Image (spheres, rainbow, N blue to C red):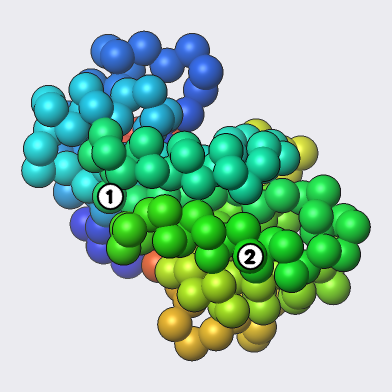
Amino acid sequence: MEKTEILARVDHTALKSTATWEDIRLLCEEAVEYKTASVCIPPSYLKRARAAFPQLNLCTVIGFPLGYSTTASKVFETKDAVTHGADEIDMVVNLGDVKNGNFEEVTAEIMAVREAAQGRLLKVIVETCYLTREEKIRICKCVTDAKADYIKTSTGFGSAGAQLEDIELFREHIGSDVKIKAAGGIRTQEAMEAFCQAGCSRIGCSAAIKALCGK
């Protein structure tokens, strides 16, 4: 793949708790220069990033990184993010509900966040490293039934990141309108190409520009 093709699928990411405005500003400048799909940044930087980079596609995270905040909290976070300029929302599912087998609640929460997102692109982070194969299949149905735009593998803060076998499993079980985002541990051009070729429309990565462009 051409580097520009890969970059066009990258959510250029900086989600460390210690990220400074200078880190975010540089991330945004790189995203503009290299034409990435978006930047994925902490909610607290949305307003400032929107003012500084009005042309940029801004993604943020909700219920991040553990996912166990209440649905009401996630809905508030989402509405607040939209107010401050978010174009895309990456939400973390409640893994406790998943482990308890409460898949109807998982679906209902995704639907509530989707409504709060007011038409913004919604990606659902399922944190595959903590799930059984059966749970992954059940979550594919939740994401599909809730009419989210994407299923996303990982936060990057779990015990492992994206795995190609999970992309294959998702492709088999998600609905035709649901796309796939891989994230977590993807640091080389070869890995990015492999996930794109496996069927990922987005790659969440903090190292893409360094890996692809040497910066």
Query: Please, what is the three-letter code of the amino acid marked with disc 2?
Result: Ala
Visible residue check, residue 173: yes
x and y percent of residue 33 in the render?
13, 39
The CA span between labels 2 and 1 is: 22 Å
* Horizontal side of residue 135 vs 170, given as left or right: right
User: Which labelled disc corresponds to residue 125?
Assistant: none
Taking the spot 87% from the left edge, 64% from the top edge, the residue there is 101
Q: Quadrant of residue 78?
A: top left
Q: Tag count in the figure?
A: 2
At which x and y percent is residue 165? 70, 69
Q: Secondary structure at mark 1?
A: loop
Badge 1, how many Cα within 10 Å: few under 14, some, many 20+?
A: many
Q: Quadrant of the N terminus?
A: bottom left
Asked whether, in this view, residue 195 is left or right of residue 88, the answer is right
Quarter-wise, where is residue 185 in the image?
top right
**Against 165, is 84 above or below?**
above
Q: Most extreme residue toward the front, as rendered?
A: 72
Residue type beneath disc 1: Asp
